[in-house]
Image (spheres, helix red, strand yellow):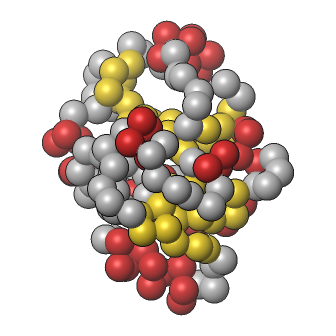
Amino acid sequence: MNKIEIYAYLKENNIWHEISEHNAVFNMSEISDVILPYPECVAKNLFIRDNKKRNYYLITVKGDKRVNLKDFKQKYNTCSLSFASENDLLELLDLLPGSVTPLGILNDKEHKVQFFLDKDFTEEPKLIGVHPNDNTATIWLKTQDLIEITKQHGNIVNIFEI
């Protein structure tokens, strides 16, 4: 799904959302320059794979947090981890660098990607801001709706503390 298809999907399924269009942003420092209605709910997304290229993880945390991959590896008993390649990103989620988002999971036809969501998004105001598969907008969703969308698609959702 592309950005327009994401918007249509949300509308067709009566999922509450707000859209903030903006110039393309490629990292967290660039998004901090954009005026957004819920800046405390902006998500940072890491697309990770194990060293055997068998397991893929999308880790989504609050924008101001850091993810220690060694700690993640130990806690979830995975093989060594590194960032997935641009080819993996395109092949599995149909996304380009700078556009990584949990909504990309809707393009994961084989349900290979496990979704790890920062528990802080489940606390008030229970909103999350992610790209709609394109880095020229941020879409605001209720966290529970994002979790349900992902589960209904058939991917594993893990709520974790960082």
Is 15 in front, or is 105?
15
Residue 64 in percent (x, y) is at: 58, 31
- Residue at 59 percent across and 73 percent down: it is 18
Is 142 in front, or is 115?
142
- Residue at 45 percent across and 85 percent down: it is 8
Quarter holding residue 12: bottom right
Which quarter shows the C terminus?
top right
Quick check: 162 above or below 19? above
- Residue at 33 percent across and 21 percent down: it is 82
| Left or right of 15 in this view: 104 | left
| Left or right of 138 in this view: 4 | left
Is 72 in front, or is 134?
134
Residue 36 in percent (x, y) is at: 56, 58
Query: Residue lying furthest bottom in this view?
Result: 12
In this orientation, does residue 113 appear?
A: no
Residue 35 in percent (x, y) is at: 52, 56
In this orientation, does residue 52 appear?
A: yes
Quick check: 140 above or below 82? below
Quick check: 72 above or below 5? above
- Residue at 66 percent across and 77 percent down: it is 16
Query: Residue lying furthest left in this view?
Result: 87
- The number of callouts visible is 0
Which quarter shows the N terminus?
bottom left
Quick check: 43 above or below 65? below
Residue 156 in percent (x, y) is at: 56, 48
